Amino acid sequence: MSILSREGSVLDRPGSSGISVDIDILLERIRNDLHEPQRAFFDDNTTEILGLSAGYGAGKTRALCAACVKLAALNVGFTGAVMEPTGPLIRDIWQTDFEQFLEHYEIPYTFRASPLPEYILHLPGGDTKILCRSFENWSRIIGLNLAFVLADEIDTVAPSVCDRAFPKILGRLRAGNVRQFCAASTPEGFRWMWNTFGSDQAKEREDRKLIKMRTQDNPHLPMISLSECKQTMIRVCCKPISTESLPISQQVRFMIVLLGLIM
């Protein structure tokens, strides 16, 4: 076996389906382990553009891992993609958390690191491929036919990059049974999350929905961590907002949104 590919500790042979996995029982186990806002995110299979706005430590990446497995199960035989802001974050955040998630639930998978990282989940009925890509190199998904795309910490991506990438990404959602774009992020001012879900124009759209998740919604977060996360969010709220061209009413609304994630 090449050092560039590996199987997890509970895997079938590469290319085989997860015949030992009861997908309904698996998804129910995953759902039961989520807290309420995570479940709302997990349960939505119909909204084309689904957002999760969350405080620090609220469980954003866990919610994305759960949604990724669910969408893989709903789109067996097709390809999805997960996007982090940069290449190193794919390795440092997504791969670490996703592999722990897969191994915890004993989901058969194969991982390939080169030329670009990707997972293949071996599920009943066939395999689902999950590409791992960075927003800084978003053009690499051009030409692909994807069933789903999940984006982590999208508000840390430069707005100019998001403005170019987002329409192209939506244009790639042209395959599979359940086509969906899901994004999770802590809001970082009047950036992608606000423009996509919070603005008056966005609220008139029927193709999108935002779910809000507070830091204290995570029952697994130790009290000391909860306190630290709240202090961090408060510091963010107290920073001068560098959006002087926006009406003061919109600046106040954004601060209310941030405070709502920690209160």
Image (cartoon, grey):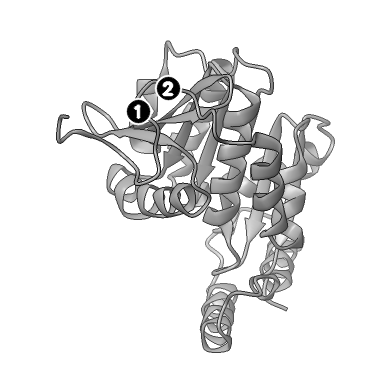
Say which quarter of the image contains residue 200.
top right
Percent of width and height locating residue 84: 41, 44
Report crowding for label 2: few under 14, some 14 to 19, many 20 or more residues within 10 A (C-alpha). some
Residue 98 higher or lower than 224, as above or below: above
Q: In this orientation, does residue 39 appear? A: yes
Residue 50 higher or lower than 244, as above or below: above
Residue sticking out furthest to the front: 20
The residue pinned by badge 1 equals: 13
The residue pinned by badge 2 equals: 16
Label 2 sits on a secondary structure element that is loop
- Depth check: give the residue in front, 159 or 13: 13
Q: Are marks 1 and 2 in contact (CB under 8 Å)?
A: yes
Say which quarter of the image contains residue 205.
top right
Say which quarter of the image contains residue 115.
top left
The residues tagged by marks 1 and 2 sit, at their Cα atoms, a distance apart of 6 Å
Percent of width and height locating residue 215: 64, 72
Mark 1 belongs to which amino acid? Arg
- Depth check: give the residue in front, 87 or 121: 121
